[in-house]
Amino acid sequence: MIDDKAFFKLVLDTTPDQVVVINSVGDIVYVNRSWQNFGEQNDCACCDMWEQQNYLAECEKAAQKGDDFGLKAFNGITSVISGANNDFYLEYPCHSEDEKRWFMMRVVSFNHLENGYYAISHQNITERKLAEELVQKQLGVDGLTNIANRGYFDEFLVKEWNRCKRLNMPLSLVIIDLDDFKMLNDTYGHQQGDTCLKEVANLLNDFAKRPSDLCARFGGEEFVLVYGNTNSDQACSILYSLQKKLSALNIDNKHSLPSKTLTVSIGLTTVIPCDNFTTESLVKEADDLLYKAKNNGKNQLCVSDLAFV
Ligand SMILES: Nc1nc2c(ncn2[C@@H]2O[C@H](COP(=O)(O)OP(=O)(O)OP(=O)(O)O)[C@@H](O)[C@H]2O)c(=O)[nH]1
């Protein structure tokens, strides 16, 4: 039986997973070779000079900067240290400038010479996550917000267009763009920006309840709403209550000009589908109205009713 410290250290250095061991107050007491390599290649505070670092303090720092995953990691690790949980798993994004990456953190406790220790391993799960993203895309779901994606919207709009054309009913199309979203990203960080997009998407999705309605992410910080069998007045009244609910969310965007909290600009157009129009011209009209709203100072709704033209 081998009982040699150097031997086991070498064994731990063979794993591609980044392993770090902390004590019960979060001080790092051991890291393997993969951990050190990752730190050197990625400029990570916690991997560099690891002997002087406290893992929990690094998670807390990340959480204070608005990193949700930092907070989740902190809570998960402390739950294992306190004995509330036997172990803890967390899948989290760790994208670099030029590469999408995800990792799974796994925390397990063990005792050595009557002291409690916690082995935290980080496994690269990017391949699986990319495969999941691809499946989601094929299913028509936007990976970040979990609402419909652009591809699903394109198909839905054509179907709803044809149905409304057959039944001679109005169809309303709305394009919503978050105001000064770049500022929000720049002020609070990209991750906070992602959280904001998810919050807004959830809210908008609540305003697409009927089978003939759809809320989708059009791209970036733009969303679309389709309302079959809905005239301009009806769509406007939905959008006024949507604007109220959005402003009640009170999402900070302190450097934005229209307001210190997040606002949106909206283009709404309504048409009774016929051969004079196409789905493309409908989208273009809503987009033109959106840009009119932006140019008029943002935080407003611009409307055109083509149903009676
Ligand atoms: N966090 C995050 N940001 C995104 C995402 N998609 C697009 N963005 C950002 O959205 C910002 C859009 O910037 P702009 O097109 O200048 O628009 P804006 O700052 O909202 O300005 P206006 O439209 O004129 O009000 C860019 O900084 C993009 O990086 C995303 O998925 N997550």
Image (cartoon, grey):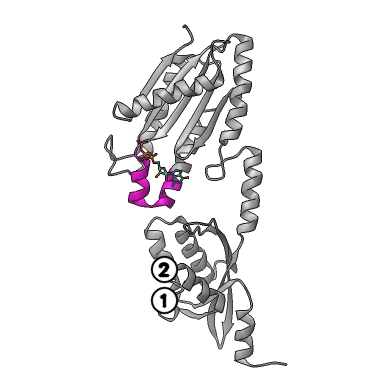
Q: Residue at x 61, y 72 (%)?
A: 16
Q: Residue at x 30, y 26 (%)?
A: 296
Vertical position of residue 276 compared to residue 210: above or below? above
Question: Quick one: 140 or 213, which is closer to the camera?
Answer: 140
Q: Position of residue 196 (x, y in %)?
A: 43, 44
Q: Quarter-wise, where is residue 158 in the image?
A: top right
Tell me the SS state at disc 1: loop
Magenta segment, which residues? 180-196
Q: Which residue is mark 2?
A: 58
- Of mark 1 and mark 2, the one earlier in the sequence is 1
Asked if marks 1 and 2 touch (Cβ < 8 Å), the reply is: yes
| Side of 125 where 52 appears, left or right | left
Q: CA distance from mark 1 to mark 2?
A: 8 Å
Q: Which residue is mark 1?
A: 53
Give the image location of residue 199, x and y in percent: 46, 41
Look at the image and tell me in which quarter the N terminus lies.
bottom right
Q: Position of residue 153 (x, y in %)?
A: 58, 30
